[in-house]
Every structure is written in structure tokens, then in C-alpha cells.
């Protein structure tokens, strides 16, 4: 690894390694080796995290994960392998208690449509409009089983997150009553195939309704700490 | 010259290999490569994050505040499982959050302008990681690439040109040079001591640098004592802090000191170049990985195969701020097909076009155009700005120099219009240290 002293190209290398004493050159050579190995390792780890599961990443999965997460993760694939082909909307409704003690259920409110309205004609939509509910629902759906039961800590956290998003938008009072409990459902509508294609598909919205959730003070704005 | 004789004559493979290695070593140690490319990446990511935070100013509480829907308590439970770095977990108070948000904005502005850049990039990284890790589910791909680049920028000498640091270094150089009259401003390389100042943007840090460094030391001490940092992060920050202090001290000593001190300084300089060049390579590989993996995954997707993939995002409610425009594009089957296939071809081919400068520039133009259209059509301006900033690492030097000159001229004219602006003092286009034309064509293949 020791750099050859007689090879300094004219002019450029005046401050380069060629002008250094032997101990300094050895030190630099070691540094070059360390940096090279470090970079090779980093690139290998990052590559294995983004690549599909393969022989090497299966064998060293734990090492890759412990190195890459949480700071070097790359978590988006630019619409690959297929772009999302359905509109996922989140609807919510509530049971409210009126002042006279009677209760009633509100109609379903399309919260995603409210996001859509905010995005419409907006050159720079906020993350609160474009990402908040959309990604919260992904998080929720990923961590709940088919019956709407939460899976582990993430399941419980995602449930509380959705509740807090809904309550932030509903507020504690709705339709002249205080909100006692809420229910959410997803409405998934496939994007109709292009008119110019020969493909024909039925565009039907499917709903997945979640259980009723009791609203507590922790779900209201101000109860987050 | 013996070198030349050996070059022409029968040269053994061993000698050739030796020469190749030594040339490569000189290349990666003697200078911080890509001064314009790293500067544009710095400016791009500084701007993307600064303007994002500015845009979200009215929504900052909802995104990252203690009472966000993703409440402080929820974030803490998640972070306990993954140990993500965020100073926002130090306290659930609102004033702490407000302070962090404002400091993150200030750091982004400092990175954008190149003001005490080596320190500013560290603070920038702290700001990016703290806010994003606080509310991971608020982010998208744009946040992700800013997150990665914020870490990488810490290790680069990204303020060699187009920065307040470069301007300060140039002025210091001019002050040094004028009494002797040996060296004219704008000359690319100055001899001896002057060149040492030119070599390190951070050399002429001045009083501001010392104050910043001391303040960082105090904050770091406080947070370490209070147990706010994990062992890994504490070591990382203290090491950076020590290195910055050492660099300053060594530079001061080298001005008057003997050959030994100068050599220590040179070794430090070489190490900084080495790390810069290594991380620059990582950045380039990372950008290639983003595109090639995206391309490879897409090839497996049926919608990319049948040429309709681009149609679908045009019909997603969350990504159509201008539905009329999106539907206009979506209505044209041939156009959708061309964009779909073009995208896959570009992404898969991109890393390999780095072997050919002209092909690379054509594809780079195509990708930047595509990101500009994504910015408008899908309503993702900050994502697009971040991706363009990442792409910019591959822009040719000649183009960047041209861009810098015209932007500078434009700025000068604008300043002339301001009251009291007056004609600008003649400012030479900042010349990078010992840059060769070859640098403009470099790619990952250009380095051993």
C-alpha cells in the first residue's frame, strides 16, 4: 500500500502524499485502507437493504438490519414494482351525546376527501394534507389483522394515532353533542383502467369497517403527552 | 524524465499497477474532488429542507409538536424500540420543540449559504434527524433522501465554492497577499502558506468559528452529562468536536511552526480530503442505487411492462393537485406508454451511462425534467427538489461554472438596483484548488 514517492504528477501533488515523510505516509496509507473498507462495508449494507431478499441478505439479515436501521434506511421505491392502483380513503363517524342525554350516530365523514380538497390547486401541499392520514392508515393496516385486531406495540400505537387524527379533525363537539366514541372504515376504490386500453374492470368501492373505539382524554388535542 | 522513459518503454505490469495506484492515491488525497458538485448538493438540500420547514411553519405543531396527532408519548414508545436519534425526546415541552424547529431552520439556512459549513452541516443533520425521527409517519421519499444526505454532508468539504466560507477564505487570502504583491486575486493556486488557507475552507474560521465551537462544546457537555445521547452518538459528536478543534489548532500552529507541524497539518488535510472523496463516492453510489433498484423493481411490475404505469398516479386523489392537467396526460395512451418505458429505461441504464459522459448528461437532463414534472403534476415539490439536488452530484463542472457565473451576474445586477447597492466590487469566479478539466467527467469509475 505504500505510495511511491517519485510519482508526483507535476504541480498538482505539491501537498499530496509524495511530499510527506515515511511515518506520515504510512499513517495515510492506513487511513486510506480504513476509509476504503468502511465505504465498501457501508455501500454493501445499503445495497443489501434495498435489494430483494437474496442469498447474502438472508444469511446476514441481522447485521444488515442493525447497521441500516434506523438512520440509513431507504424506504421508498418510486412507484415500483407497480404504482398504487387504487384510491384509499379513510371515513370516520361518531356517536355523540346531546345535552338532553340522548345519543345519535353521525354520518360517515370522508376525511381523505377533505385532504383532497386541500391538495386541489395547491402547488405545495403540506405533509399534514398529503402524508398524515394516508401514511397513518398504511401504518394501521400493516399492523392489524383481518379482523381489526392490533398486532403488537405498533398495532396499538397506530390505533391511537388514527384516533387522535380523527379527533383532531372532529373536535370534542360534533353535531351539537360531545363525541363519545368513533368508528373508522377504509374505502378502497380501484382506479378505472384507461379508456384507451382494452382492459375492462369493475370499479367498485370496498369498505373495511373497524370496531367502535371509546374516546378518552388522551385522544383529544392537549392529551398527547 | 525517468517517468516518461518508462512510460514509453517496455513497462512491466507491476510498474504500471504501481503507477496507477500512486496516481489514484494522489488523486484522492491531494484534493477534495467535485467542489462544484458538492456545493450544488449542499445548496440543494439546504434549500429543500429550509423551504420545506418554512412552508410547514403554520403546520409545525401538527407535524412535530408535542401535541401532534403522533403524540410525544406515542413517538417515545416507538423510539424506545428502534433507538432513532432525536433531541425532541429530551423534553415534551412546547418551547423546546419551538427552539429545535427554529434552530433546524437556521442550520438549513447556514448550510444553504455555506456559513461555517463544517459546523452547520452537523447542526443541519441534528435538525433533520430530530424532526423526521420524531414523526416518521409524516414523511415521504423526499424526507428519506434528505435524511440520508444530511448525514453524508457532515463528512464533505462542500463549501469550497459558492459559500460565505469560501468568500471569507478568499478575503483572508487577499489580505495576506496584497502587501507582498506577489499574488493576484483569482489566481487558482497561491504558494506556500497562502495555499494552505485556500485548501481548507474552514481554516479562516475566525472568531465566529471559535465562538460556535465553544458553544457546541457546552451544549454537548450538557447533553452528555444529562444522559441525552446514546454512547454511539456521544462518541460521534465528541469526535467531530475534537477534530474541528484540532484542525483549528493545527492550522494556527502551522503558520509559524516548523516542518513537523506543517506536516501534521498536511496529514490532517489529506485525511479530510480522503473522507470527503470517499463520502462523495458513497453519495454517487447511493443515487445510482436509488435509480437502479427502482428500475429493476419496475421491470418486474406488470403495469410498467404493459406501458400503463404512469396512468395510475395521475388518478390518485392524493397526488393530483391539478386534475385537469393530470387527466390530459392520462388521456393520451401513446404519451403514457412513452413516459412509462422511458422512465424504466432511464432508471435501469443510468449507472452504466456514467461510463460515457455524453450519455450521462442526456439521461441526467431527462431525469431532472421528469422530476420537475413530478413536482407539478403530483404536487411533490420538495421531494422533487431533493431528488434534483441528489442528481446534481453528476452535473458536469463546465455547466455548473457557467450556472454560477450567470447566477452571480444576475445577483450583481439585482444588487445594483437596490438603493445603495452600487456597482459590485469585482469578484472573481471562485476557482477551486488545483482543479483539472478531467474532474468534470468523473464518475464512480474515475476512482480506484
Image: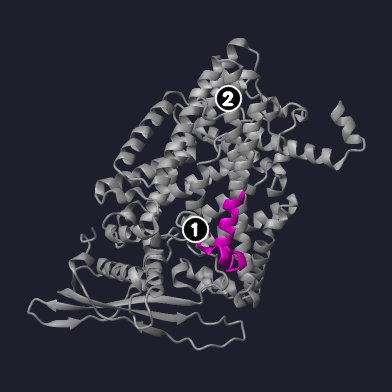
> For residue B153, which numbered disc appears in the image?
none
In this orientation, does residue B37 appear? no
Q: At which x and y percent is residue B337?
A: 65, 73
In this orientation, does residue B151 appear? yes
Who is closer to the viewer here, B424 or B66?
A: B66
Question: Range of the magenta residues?
Answer: A40-63
- Reading the image, the residue beneath label 2 is B264
Few, some or many residues within 10 Å of mark 2 (<14, 14–19, 20+): some
Q: At which x and y percent is residue B352?
A: 71, 57
Nearer to us: label 1 or label 2: 2
- Reading the image, the residue beneath label 1 is A73
The quarter of the displayed image where residue A106 is located? bottom left
Q: Is residue A42 left or right of residue B5?
A: left
Gap in angstroms between the C-alphas marked 1 and 2:
37 Å
Q: At which x and y percent is residue A153?
A: 33, 68
| CB contact under 8 Å: marks 1 and 2 | no
The residue depicted at 60 percent of the width and 56 percent of the height is: A44
* Quarter of the image that includes the C terminus of chain A: bottom left
Dots 1 and 2 on the same chain: no
Residue at the extreme top of the image, as rendered: B180
Magenta span includes B446? no
Q: At which x and y percent is residue B126?
A: 41, 45
The quarter of the displayed image where residue A81 is located? bottom right
Who is closer to the viewer here, B435 or A154?
A: A154
Amino acid at each position: 500500500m505504500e505510495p511511491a514517492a517519485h510519482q508526483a504528477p507535476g504541480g498538482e501533488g505539491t501537498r499530496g502524499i509524495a511530499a510527506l515523510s515515511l511515518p506520515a505516509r504510512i499513517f495515510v496509507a492506513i487511513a486510506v485502507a480504513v476509509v476504503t473498507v468502511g465505504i465498501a462495508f457501508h455501500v454493501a449494507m445499503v445495497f443489501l437493504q434495498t435489494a430483494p431478499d437474496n442469498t447474502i441478505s438472508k444469511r446476514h439479515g441481522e447485521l444488515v438490519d442493525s447497521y441500516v436501521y434506523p438512520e440509513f434506511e431507504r424506504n421508498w421505491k418510486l412507484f415500483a414494482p407497480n404504482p398504487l392502483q387504487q384510491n384509499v380513503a379513510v371515513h370516520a363517524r361518531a356517536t355523540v351525546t346531546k345535552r338532553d342525554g340522548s345519543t345519535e350516530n353521525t354520518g360517515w365523514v370522508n376525511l381523505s376527501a377533505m385532504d383532497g380538497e386541500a391538495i386541489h390547486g395547491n402547488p405545495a401541499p403540506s405533509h399534514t394534507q398529503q402524508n398524515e392520514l394516508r401514511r397513518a392508515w398504511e401504518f394501521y393496516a400493516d399492523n392489524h389483522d383481518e379482523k381489526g385486531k392490533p398486532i403488537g406495540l405498533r398495532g396499538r400505537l397506530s390505533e391511537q394515532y388514527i384516533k387522535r387524527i380523527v379527533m383532531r379533525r372532529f373536535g370534542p363537539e360534533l353535531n351539537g353533542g360531545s363525541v363519545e366514541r368513533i368508528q373508522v372504515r377504509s374505502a378502497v376504490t380501484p382506479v378505472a383502467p384507461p379508456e384507451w386500453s382494452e382492459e375492462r374492470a369493475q370499479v367498485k368501492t370496498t369498505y373495511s369497517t373497524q370496531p367502535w373505539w371509546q374516546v378518552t382524554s388522551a385522544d383529544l388535542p392537549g392529551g398527547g403527552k | 524524465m525517468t517517468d516518461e522513459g518508462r512510460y514509453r518503454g517496455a513497462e512491466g505490469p507491476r510498474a504500471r499497477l504501481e503507477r496507477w495506484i500512486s496516481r489514484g492515491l494522489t488523486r484522492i488525497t491531494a484534493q477534495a474532488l467535485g467542489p462544484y458538485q458538492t456545493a450544488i448538493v449542499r445548496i440543494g438540500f439546504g434549500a429543500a429542507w429550509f423551504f420545506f420547514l418554512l412552508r410547514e411553519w403554520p403546520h409545525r405543531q401538527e407535524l412535530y409538536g408535542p401535541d401532534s396527532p403522533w403524540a410525544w408519548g406515542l413517538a417515545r414508545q416507538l423510539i424506545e424500540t428502534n433507538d432513532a436519534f432525536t433531541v425532541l425526546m429530551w423534553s415534551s415541552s412546547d418551547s423546546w420543540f419551538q427552539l429545535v424547529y427554529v434552530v433546524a431552520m437556521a442550520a438549513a439556512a447556514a448550510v444553504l449559504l455555506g456559513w461555517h459549513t463544517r459546523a452547520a452541516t452537523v447542526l443541519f443533520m441534528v435538525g433533520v434527524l430530530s424532526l423526521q425521527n420524531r414523526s416518521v409517519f409524516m414523511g415521504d421519499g423526499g424526507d428519506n433522501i434528505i435524511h440520508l444526505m444530511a448525514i453524508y454532508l457532515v463528512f464533505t468539504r462542500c463549501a469550497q465554492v459558492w459559500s460565505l466560507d469560501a468568500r471569507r477564505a478568499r478575503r483572508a487570502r487577499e489580505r495576506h497577499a496584497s502587501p507582498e504583491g506577489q499574488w493576484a486575486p483569482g489566481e487558482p493556486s497561491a504558494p506556500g502558506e497562502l495555499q494552505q488557507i485556500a485548501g481548507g475552507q474552514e481554516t479562516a474560521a475566525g472568531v465566529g468559528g471559535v465562538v460556535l465551537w465553544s458553544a457546541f462544546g457546552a451544549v454537548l457537555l450538557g447533553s452528555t452529562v444529562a444522559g441525552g445521547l446514546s454512547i454511539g452518538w456521544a462518541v460521534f459528536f465528541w469526535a467531530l468536536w475534537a477534530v474541528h478543534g484540532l484542525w483549528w489548532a493545527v492550522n494556527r500552529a502551522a503558520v509559524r511552526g516548523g516542518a513537523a507541524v506543517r506536516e501534521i497539518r498536511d496529514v490532517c488535510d489529506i485525511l479530510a480530503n480522503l473522507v470527503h472523496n470517499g463520502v462523495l463516492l458513497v453519495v454517487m453510489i447511493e443515487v445510482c442505487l436509488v435509480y437502479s433498484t427502482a428500475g429493476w423493481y419496475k421491470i418486474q411490475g406488470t403495469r410498467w411492462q404493459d406501458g400503463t404505469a404512469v396512468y395510475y398516479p395521475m388518478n390518485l386523489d392524493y397526488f393530483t393537485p391539478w386534475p385537469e392537467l393530470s387527466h390530459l396526460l392520462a388521456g393520451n395512451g401513446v404519451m403514457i406508454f412513452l413516459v412509462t418505458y422511458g422512465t424504466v429505461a432511464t432508471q435501469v441504464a443510468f449507472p452504466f451511462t456514467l461510463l460515457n459522459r455524453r450519455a450521462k448528461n442526456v439521461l441526467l437532463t431527462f431525469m431532472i425534467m421528469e422530476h420537475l414534472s413530478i413536482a407539478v403534476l403530483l404536487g411533490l415539490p420538495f421531494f422533487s427538489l431533493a431528488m434534483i439536488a441528489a442528481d446534481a452530484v453528476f452535473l458536469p463542472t463546465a455547466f455548473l461554472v457557467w450556472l454560477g457565473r450567470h447566477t452571480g451576474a444576475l445577483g450583481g445586477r439585482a444588487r445594483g438596483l437596490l438603493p445603495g447597492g452600487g456597482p459590485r466590487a469585482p469578484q472573481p469566479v471562485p476557482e477551486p484548488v488545483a482543479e483539472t478539466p478531467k474532474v468534470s467527467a468523473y464518475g464512480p469509475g474515475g476512482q480506484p
